[in-house]
Amino acid sequence: MDHFVDLTLGGLASGAVYAALALSLVIIYQATRLVNFAQPALALVAVYTAATVAPLTGSYWLGFAAALTAGTAAGALVERFVVRPIARVSRLNGIIVTLGLLLVAQGGVGMVWGNDQHGFRYAFDFVGRPSPADVFALASVAAVAVLLFCLYRHTPLGLRMRAAALHPEAARLSGVRAGLMLTAGWAISALIASLAGMLAGPPFISPNVFDAVFVYGITAAVVGGLDNPFGAVVGGLLVGLGMSYVSGYAGPELATLTALALVVLVLSVRPDGILSRPAARKV
Amino acid sequence: MSAALLEVVGLGASYGAVRALDSVSFTVPERGFRAVLGANGAGKTTLLRTLTGLHRADAGRVLLDGEDITRMPAERVITRGLAHVPEGGGVITGLTVEENLRLGALWRSPRRDRATEAEVLELFPPLVPRLGRSAGTLSGGERQMLAIGRALMARPRVLLLDEPSLGLAPLVTRQIFALLRDLRERTGLTVVLVEQNAAGALAATDSGVVLGQGRVAVEGPSAELLSDDRTRHAYLGF
Amino acid sequence: MSTSATEREPRTAGGPARRRVDLPSPLRHLLLAALALAAVAGLLLVTGDLTALRLAAVGYTMLAVAGLQLLVGGSGQVSLGHGAFMMIGAYTMALLVLRLPMLPLAGNLVAVVAVATVAGVAVGAATARLHGPYLAGATLILAVGLPGLTHRYHEVLGGSNGLTVRTAGAPPFLQGLVSGSEWKALVVWTAVVLGLAVLATVSTGRLGRRMRAVRDDETAAAMSGIPVGATKVTAFVVASAAGGLAGGLQVYVLGTATPSMFTLSLSLTLLAALVLGGIGSMWGALWAALAVVYLEIWLSDAVRAFELGKDVENNLPIVLFGVLLILVLRFQPLGLHGILQRLRALLRRAR
């Protein structure tokens, strides 16, 4: 029973991280119908920035701030100067270019810091039930989700961003700078991915540290529906719990393949995710 | 005719190698109500899209009250007072009716413009009970109202409309035309109306431009165009 | 420079055959394959052992990329799981050599293809309804997750140390005539050209046309009576079989299979190489394979010459492939093959 409670708490905490990643994927998917496979690349930029800045300044929180800033800036720049001109040509090219960015980031980090694991101190303790780290993860992701909801539903910027995503041309005719809104969406998405990276990366970081995390993030987004932010959050928590139980009772090596089975199963039954409303196929 | 509010000089545009507009020139005076007519593929929609910067002009100029707006991106043209209701209305179905309206005024101020909103809703009473609903639930006529309403939220000086009658019942179309005339009388709005429905449009407007294969074929007061049999047969098909 | 020789080889092989368009497609491709093999053999005669190993690497890499080419360029499905199928082929090969040493090499390779095909059918059928980003996502999970199995089944698959095998060299009657490496290169290329002939036959045949129809517009293809699902799955299976065979050949040459050989980076690099070589043409796979093998070698040499360290040496090829991928997509979407074709057209016009 103790084991079960541990697994549940741990599952919820990591589920929060997956929810954040899924949310960041959904933001970009809603705006451009593109799944951003470069999301772990942005998270890498963030954690390695933190791992550099924190020891230099002696403050974890300065490193944290630097990480979010660097990740956000990277997301905005990459959208404007790399992804947009290429994704315009075809969706296939759009997917491939984000994969190229992932290669560049993983290789680049490896070139500078090496492929081995680096220790990276975390601000909170991992001990306890729930541990302070778990609480921080859950609380910060919950805060992000609420803020995001308010931003999109209740601010002029949110209205502009939604309009630009739904109907770029009509939005432009209403004076919305649709291109800028796209960049803004990527920036917000990158910010959340950076946060997810800061939560998921420690205590050890390496160029491939986010491969598995990203896998669960994608799983969560797919399960919840790629254009459904609420689905992403629910999907994240479900996947977190599920993977925690699978790792705890069956072995951690099986978790990834369980995720694959989950994705395939969900998509075979509900191709647009569990929480999606069935929509007519667009021709 | 006093100084033109909207002046189009030798405008040209293409889709790849296909010439869609070829040195199109015409003017619209302040408080004018002008119809742009022509067969399918004559370049009517391209003309409007080029005027508001959705399509690139490769020749000529567009002047709005003397200011050159030819190369201005679409999202800035609206800030100069030129509103464009695209074909089909361009209502954003994923937003609520109210959000669509608010979006129209957003470039002026991030704060909600309740006064203009009330004015617009007065013009389109059927929208009032549907404010909180998704725009996707509206009927065709209501969507067209919402589209025009959103454009009016910007408090434009010139309103460009692309086939507002498309898919609407004749009665609804007449109501919309009448409303546009009324708006012109009351607020001094200048209107350019692109129409396939030439008879209806000429009955409502005071002058017309007829496009044929991307060029201005005939131009003149609506009543004259309506009575000139040759024009009617050659370009308007009725 | 050894590559210029390899680059020239397929074209001389392609020249005479191209005029015989009246030959049935499988036969024509077999003839091409035989010519290509002869060219490789000729090349082996004049080069040394080291080049032989590199040529073998070019061979199996080309086969893997060509399979991916059929899938991505042909049917428009992005799979990030190609490395996973190479891994399946590689581990099958290693296990066969370890557990059933009496089997002949040809038998092993047939078994490898069979296992990879079965795996391809399983994954392909499961993902048949996924499209675009969903398929990419699902196969990404496969690529990340599969190497983990080696830890789970440590006793059989050897954990992170993987499996090490000894493969037989040249048969006794050829000893002294060809070295072990040369023999391996010949074996690899024999299998590769056979595989490529199959891939070429598939992609120029009815299935290939169907795949392209599905790629261009799934709905329109379905409405013209093409079985969309079956076409996509078949493309996936053929690509998986090619990937599996490539993995099996890799183990045959290198004598080892470890999980670190089949990371996500491998799948991404293959995809990058494909785009770099030229999506939409089998020749693109050759340029891609040459790029993968030789860029890595040259970069390693350069890094060592400048003493930039192990970290740079290990990662520079990856970064370069990523950067090249992005640049090619941005400025030259048809890749190296597109550039070469344009050059050829220019030359022809100049004449």
Image: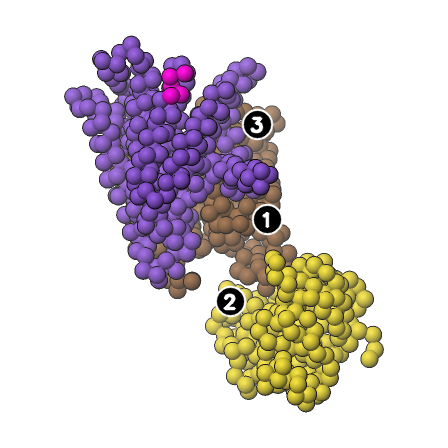
Chain colours: A brown, B yellow, C purple
Q: Position of residue B103 (x, y in %)?
A: 61, 65
Return the disc, 1 or 3, that comes first in the chain's sequence: 3
Per the rendered image, the range of residues in magenta is: C42-46
Q: Are marks 1 and 3 on the same chain?
A: yes
Q: Kindly report the secondary structure that dominates the magenta region of the rendered protein.
A: helix
Image quarter of residue B82: bottom right
Mark 2 or 3, closer to the camera? 2
Q: Position of residue A68 (x, y in %)?
A: 57, 39
The kind of residue on which mark 1 rests is: Thr
Q: Residue at x 51, y 39 (%)?
A: C341
- Determine the secondary structure under disc 2: loop
Q: Check the residue under mark 2 and report the chain it is in.
A: B
| Residue C346 seen by the camera | no
Q: Position of residue C158 (x, y in %)?
A: 27, 23
Write down the residue under mark 3.
Answer: A52
- Quadrant containing the C terminus of chain C in the rendered view: top right
Write down the residue under mark 1.
Answer: A183
* Label 2–label 1 contact, CB within 8 A: no
Q: Is residue C43 rendered magenta in the image? A: yes
The kind of residue on which mark 3 rests is: Thr
Asked whether, in this view, residue C109 is left or right of residue B66, the answer is left
Query: Crowding near pointer 2: few (<14 within 10 Å), some, many (20+)?
Result: some
| Residue C304 seen by the camera | yes
Name the disc covering residue B93, or none: 2
Q: Residue at x 34, y 44 (%)?
A: C22
Q: Residue at x 38, y 48 (%)?
A: C75
Q: Position of residue A95 (x, y in %)?
A: 47, 45
Query: Crowding near pointer 3: few (<14 within 10 Å), some, many (20+)?
Result: some
Q: Nearer the viewer, residue C262 or C13?
A: C13
